[in-house]
Image (cartoon, helix red, strand yellow):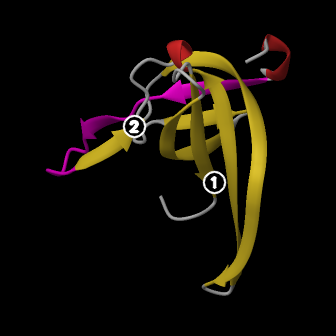
Amino acid sequence: MKAGRLRTLVDFSEPSEADDGYGGKTVTWPVTILKVPCQFRSTSAREEVDAGQLAEQLTAVLRLRARAVPGIKASWKATIDGVDWNIRQVIPFGQRGHELEVIIEKGGAV
């Protein structure tokens, strides 16, 4: 993958569970664990009416170098330009698996 295609910076965060004080747990995203350049490509957009409100769901693909994000999981989140995206799938890509495609989504169910 040529470095010139890696024009988008993405922050990856791992969830952390904290006690909510009432016997339950709440998920927090304490800190960014990785900041990596990637190639961003929007793949689809869908709008639907949910409880009388227009809801938009966007799907995109990040392509990045595998060594830049060791151990990435679908439970993490990606933040691009201050917008949080849910990671849906991580797919090894390329002849030797040196690249990853990360399917991300925003606006839909978590």
The residue where tag 2 is placed is 28
Labelled pair 1, 2 in contact (Cβ < 8 Å): no
The residue drawn where x is 82% and y is 22% is 5
Q: Which picture quadrant has residue 107? A: bottom right
Q: In the shown orientation, is residue 52 left or right of residue 96?
A: right
| Quadrant position of residue 40 | top right
Q: Which amino acid type corresponds to the residue marked 2 in the rendered image?
A: Thr
Label 2 sits on a secondary structure element that is strand
Q: Position of residue 38 (x, y in %)?
A: 71, 24
On the picture, is 95 further left or further right than 25?
Answer: right
At x 85%, y 15%, the residue is 4
Q: Is residue 54 above or below residue 3?
A: below
Confirm whether the magenta stretch covers residue 21: yes
- Name the N-terminal-most of marks 1 and 2: 2
Q: Is residue 97 above or below residue 67?
A: below
Q: Nearer the viewer, residue 54 or 22?
A: 54
Q: Is residue 29 visible?
A: yes
On the image, which quarter does residue 21 sit in? Answer: top left
Residue beneath the point at 77% across and 49% down: 42
| 51 w.r.t. 100: above or below | below
Q: Secondary structure at mark 1?
A: strand
Split into 4 quadrants, where in the image is the N terminus?
top right
- Alpha carbon of mark 1 to alpha carbon of mark 2: how far? 18 Å
- The residue wearing badge 1 is 106
The magenta segment: 8-24
Q: How busy is the neighbourhood of tag 1: few (under 14 within 10 Å), some, or many (20 plus)?
A: some
Does residue 74 lie above or below 24 as drawn?
above
